[in-house]
Image (cartoon, helix red, strand yellow):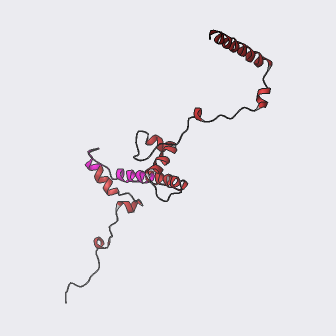
Amino acid sequence: MSGKGKGTLSKRDSKVKKSRSSRAGLKFPVGRIHRLLRRGRYAERIGGGAPLYLAGVLEYLTAEILELAGNAARDNKKTRINPRHLQLAIRNDEELSKLFNGGTISQGGVLPHIHEALLKRPKKTPASKATNTSDDKDAAGDNNNATSKDNNEDAGEN
């Protein structure tokens, strides 16, 4: 009885296919990035490590931006990240801001900033006026005399 029986599985059949992304422990698709690099004609030949490294870098940058944007959303008491949160996350981080310097984020808005000249200045206390030296008083007196002369001349013209 020489039938074809069940037999054992060959090595090829027992080997389960794993993607390059899962082997590297990445979420970003290494195979797709490799295909895009080849089709983009960036170089005549693309090594096997290049798409793997690029996928790792892209995944890291994405995770970093999403973490900062999530913090910005939480600060604004929101549960959903929107373009405004991405803008705040990127522009408030020095290195990411430098990386995305020339880029525009649609619906991102602008960073809040009020020029110092527009802010109210604190009023001087009377104690600070009393600490003037005699030189300051003389200089102030000279200015007052000059302005009073100008005022008298203006009054005479009328």
Q: Nearer the viewer, residue 99 or 54?
A: 99
Count of numbered circles in the view: 0
Q: Nearer the viewer, residue 137 or 92?
A: 137
Residue 112 in percent (x, y) is at 52, 42
Residue 100 in percent (x, y) is at 43, 42
148 to the left or right of 158: right
Q: Is residue 74 above or below residue 125?
A: below
21 to the left or right of 1: right
17 to the left or right of 59: left
Q: Is residue 110 above or below residue 16?
A: above
Q: Residue at x 52, y 52 (%)?
A: 72
In the rendered image, the quadrant that contains the C terminus is top right
Q: Which image quarter: residue 13?
A: bottom left
Dominant secondary structure of the magenta stretch?
helix
Residue 11 in percent (x, y) is at 30, 72
Magenta residues (range): 37-60
Q: Residue at x 74, y 16 (%)?
A: 139
85 to the left or right of 13: right
Q: Residue at x 72, y 16 (%)?
A: 144
> Any magenta on residue 109?
no
Q: Is residue 122 above or below residue 152?
A: below
Residue 97 in percent (x, y) is at 47, 42
Q: Which image quarter: residue 150?
A: top right
Q: Is residue 12 above or below residue 102?
A: below
> Any magenta on residue 59?
yes
In the rendered image, the quadrant that contains the N terminus is bottom left
